[in-house]
Amino acid sequence: MILSYKYRIEPNRTQAAALGEMLGDFCQLYNAGLEQRIDAWRRRHISVTYKMQADELKAVRYAAPGLARWSFTAEQQVLRRLDKTFKAFFARGRGFPRFRARARFHAAEFRVGDGLTIRKSGKLGFVGVPGEIRVRWHRELPSKPKSAILTRQAGKWYVVFHGEVDAVERASPDSIGIDFGLSSLIALSDGHTVPRPNWTKRAARELRRRQRAIARCKRGSTTRAKRKAALDRFHARVAAKRRDHLHKISRDLVDRFGRIAIEDLNVKGLASGMLAKHVHDASWAQLTAMLDYKAARAGVELVKVDPRGTSQTCPECGTIRAKTLAEREHRCDCGCRLDRDVAAAMVVHYRAFGFWPGTGLGTLSEPVAA
């Protein structure tokens, strides 16, 4: 299994300016490739492919010396990125590729050893960037990475390496069912719940203050750019707190249980409804992604079940009774009285493993590929 490892890098002022110029030139290449595809189809109905543009790249670098100072393979990745965008458009039938602004082009992909090198000193070298760039190695890489992504987020620079992990053994025989919610972030089938921190609500006051400060500035002014950068940093801090909280929850679940059942929610559809703000704040999709890769690495079985009717089904007798969102307690004629989310988590557990929590154990000692 291939996992991503993100590290903060600390370029000096000259190096940061060079990295910014590199992303700007890559953005220009992306837009030129997009324009070529559009013009070729409008004028002669020719579909330009990645191979056709990659074959012309050497000539483009010769005609534009600014592009020649950067990695050739990194520029190939820019053209591949454009090709993937077009393929995604034809697959879904909407969302035609748009021209990108330099201020919003924040990432570039590299091959490690070709365009990006890890020096013996532990620093990074980029083709066209002077000197070596310091890295905060807060953890070791599990293996030698083959590719990496340079990214700029809220004025800070990061590098994301892609490395492989080895097979592991399953450790815990326990199983758990999880229900995602808004009053409680998650409810477990053993009766425990984790409250939702409401990060957006906590940050609302400070967010309004910073947005008003931007609104009072003249468009295009230096002050407006500074205040916008401050707002971006504030959003990044809120996102970091949410991400850290989800990392701790997912790690705790993977360490405690050998089998985990969750709902296969259509988060994108839920995020387009009247509860969109709360769904985005809960970040169910991000938590699901964390559970997915951490479970695979730890050898934990992660099962996704159909979420339809989980909150309407009684976990003791199986009776289905419709409940409104305002009803936070599950009550059934059979005498079952539980927290609504806990009852749903028990139903999720049963759908995944075929037995109710605590009534059966499986053999989970076989090795799995992580």
Image: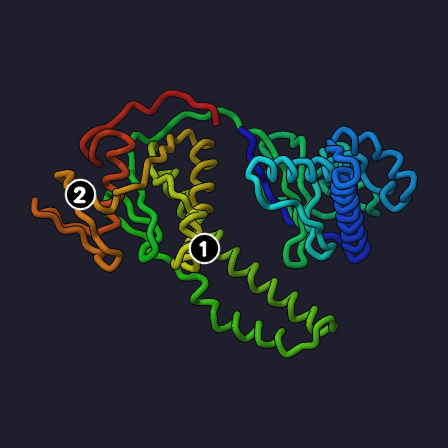
**In the rendered structure, which disc, 2 or 1, sits on the residue that comes first in sequence?**
1
**Residue 71, can we see it?**
yes
Which residue is at the front of the view, 185 or 171?
185
Residues at circles 2 and 1 in contact by the CB criterion of under 8 Å: no
Picture coordinates of residue 273, whole percent (x, y): 40, 55
**Residue 9, can we see it?**
no
Badge number at residue 280? 1
* 68 over 325 or under it: above or below: above
* 184 over 166 or under it: above or below: below
Image point (18%, 41%), residue name: 315
Q: CA distance from mark 2 to mark 1?
A: 29 Å
Q: Nearer the viewer, mark 2 or mark 1?
A: 2
Q: How many marks?
A: 2
Q: Could you tell whether 307 is left or right of 9 in the image?
A: left
In the rendered structure, which amino acid carries the disc numbered 1?
A: His
**Residue that lies at the very extreme toward the top in this rendered image:** 366
Picture coordinates of residue 126, whole percent (x, y): 78, 42
Q: Which residue is mark 2?
A: 320
Q: Could you tell whether 359 is left or right of 39 in the image?
A: left
In the rendered structure, which amino acid carries the disc numbered 2?
A: Ile
Picture coordinates of residue 188, whole percent (x, y): 28, 45
Crowding near pointer 2: few (<14 within 10 Å), some, many (20+)?
A: some
Circle 2 SS class? loop
Image point (85%, 43%), residue name: 67
Picture coordinates of residue 187, whole percent (x, y): 29, 48
Which residue is at the front of the view, 245 or 202?
202
Q: Could you tell whether 26 is left or right of 214 in the image?
A: right
Image point (64%, 67%), residue name: 228
Badge number at residue 201? none
Which residue is at the front of the view, 179 or 297?
179
